[in-house]
Amino acid sequence: MGASWGGGGQHGGRDAISRHCRLVGTSATLFTGCQPHQGHLPAERRRWVPAELRARHGLRLFALERSCCYEALLLDEERGRLFAGAQNHLLSLALDDISQRDRKIYWPAPVEWREECNWAGKDITAECMNFVKILHPYNRTHLYACGTGAFHPVCAFVEAGQHAEVELPPAKALLRPPAAAAHPPPVLTTLQEPIFKLDPRRTEDGKGKSPYDPRHAAASVLVGEELYSGVATDLMGRDFTIFRSLGRRPSIRTEQHDSRWLNEPKFVAVFWVPESEDPDDDKIYFFFRETAVERQQGLGKTSFARIGQICRNDVGGQRSLVNKWTTFLKARLVCAVPGPDGADTHFDELRDVFLLQTRDKRNPLVYAVFSTSSSVFQGSAVCVYTMADIRRAFLGPFAHKEGPNYQWVSYQGRVPYPRPGMCPSKTFGTFGSTKDFPDEVIQFARHHPLMYNPVLPHGQRPLFLQAAVPYTFTRIAVDRVTAADGHYDVLFIGTDVGTVLKVVSVPKESWHRMEPLLLEELQVFQDASPITSLQLSSKRQQLYAGSATALAQLPLHRCGAYGKACAECCLARDPYCAWDGTACTRYVPNTKRRFRRQDVRNDPRRGSVPQKQLYGVEGSTAFLECVPKSLQARVLWTYQRTPDDPQREVGSPRAGRVVRTERGVLLRSVQRADAGLYLCHATEHGFTQPLLRLSLEVIGARQAAGKAPAGDPQLAAGPPGRKVWYRDFLQLVERPPLGAADRGCQRLWSRGRPPPPPRAPAGAPGRGQGAEPRKARRRRTHEGPRAERGPRSASPW
């Protein structure tokens, strides 16, 4: 049973903090000396709006006039720059502050290209522009950029080096008198603006590298001097291909007009992953979604997520598949929630992929974002894949179909040697090139590009999903954070309403079973424009987001917003944050800062839990509101008839009248037995913290209606003409405006009473600390009708 600040004996709260102010559960926060916060708890902080982020938490925005579509982002830690592509512009921004020291290159499409685009029926103001889609580092001094060029794809090399450093003395040092010349002035080192320029006369054809249509996404990777891209190679957007260009090896592509290879694909991401120490085994992995060819006819089009592979050293076949990929294979990427009897809920619309590098560069983790394609069920999910599972699928059976009227089955025949999909390397000593492959290998690869077994996610289910929410996941970036007890993956998920969800993945029972915890929801863009790009800098602890209207930069963490108490910092479970003895701050591994020890002399319970008074009318409803600060906390309500009674959980004896909501508990048909003390607890990972105390006083229905039985001295009628105060109170309870109940009760209580005398100041004469207190006066009783009295105030507890 979790420890509680408010329960147990005199030292219950102290013992709870002593036990939990170390490392709570799987939280990556270190707590070695916690001091409870005395006073009111801060307001709830889970969702941040742009105004708050700009004012308190370092949100910075950048936008160009008469431009849009900041889709291509390239983060360069070495140069300290963020390169971005937009409509008719290339940008170079400072990583520390994107709103300072920006450099721009105006790169529009030529006038004649825009006119041809307009003649083809395109919108000259919205489509016939140069939308930069691709940005890659080419070498230490240049970038490689490609754009749509008004439906004329174009690429160029961009010089992006650094000027040499120059040493200049301070201005005041130049005005020193000759006597001070013997002492050399201090030298100030300054760095000139970075180089950022493009020669528009030195451009090249971008066909097969950048899409024609600005509405199409671009997916590519530059490895060495070779560009691997998934793109449409025609103006109409029908000939989609996986294409290799640049470099010394010949250009090569997928088979044309063969739906078994690619069927209306939408490319999402491309990555290079080494397979072994031999570079000849390196492979390129493509992530895309396409219309499924294995779907039964007559059921309509269905989109499947795919992962495809090719070998870097593939140069095509000798007699067949000339200048075509001979090592191309693809498999289905499954992200589904298992259901009863195999009725799984699938997320098939692949949106984005992030490759998280690990210590073993051959085995990164693949984080992928999906959404549903169903019009009935709307939701988004994040699934995680390992390279072991991916390689296992490509080493499994091939999918085979005998003819148009047959089903797709697992191929049971003989697979030729070397196995299709294997790279020519030292592993197969007799084959130094794909041109040396036997014809039967080439023919089998041409007719069997699809694998039968899909790639399943780690844990056989999504890591994180959201359903019935007014947004869809669009982008993802992942940061591996070092904490006191291990490493944690923090997910930053962009949505189509301009928000970023911050989610941490923690082990549930072991490190093999993970569960997500939603930490924050950040409204980055005020106009709710979809997030189209995300980049993350672990070195600078910054996140960069792009949309159609602007670029945004914000820190990865806001530790100070979790509160001023150790328990609040602990319950947040943010792996970036730790309690340092005085505040919730950024956790730094191997820090030498000494932490303060636990203060056991002070009672941690005193003054730490807010108290409220609530009135309910018998037979009506009462709402007990309590919202925890942590999104992962479970709210637990306990009840005491009197302060001396033991606490028991709310709900079991009143199961038919209790309705639990996200914001509290609703008591239906309130009874007199419901009156008492209610305590709201936040329970999380074995730790229980009291959040709020409520004193509920129940008023009889007949009292509230102003009806009393004859001879009841408590409800004797007041003087003629006076309105019974219960009717006023009933109106407040049934339809209370904000704060009206408290104000109305105070007015009713003060009705007919003289104002209280002003209190004497602390140092008033005759009332010093040594003076004896005055004796209380005895009140005389008078005959006559008893004055109407208001409700009792709650006794302190």
Image: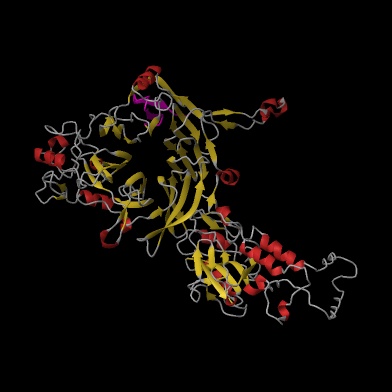
Left or right, 469 with respect to 347, comes to: right
Up-down relation of residue 173 to residue 449 (above or below): above
Residue plotted at (55% across, 44% down): 50
| Residue at the extreme top | 112
Q: Is residue 524 magenta?
A: no
Up-down relation of residue 649 to residue 70 (above or below): below
| Residue at the extreme right | 765
Up-down relation of residue 111 to residue 469 (above or below): above
Number of numbered discs on residues: 0
Q: Position of residue 252 (x, y in %)?
A: 22, 31
Front residue of 582/153: it is 153
Asked if residue 17 can be seen in this view, the reply is no
Q: Position of residue 349 (x, y in %)?
A: 33, 46
Q: Position of residue 49 (x, y in %)?
A: 55, 46
Quarter location, residue 692: bottom right
Residue plotted at (36% across, 52% down): 377
Front residue of 296/714: it is 714
Quarter location, residue 293: top left
Q: Position of residue 151 (x, y in %)?
A: 35, 25
Asked if residue 759 can be seen in this view, the reply is yes
Left or right, 53 with respect to 248, comes to: right
- Image quadrant holding the C terminus, namely bottom right
Q: How is the image coloured?
A: secondary structure
Front residue of 750/62: it is 750
| Residue at the extreme bottom | 711
Left or right, 538 with respect to 189, comes to: left
Up-down relation of residue 251 to residue 293 (above or below): above
Q: Over which residues does the magenta segment extend?
A: 138-163
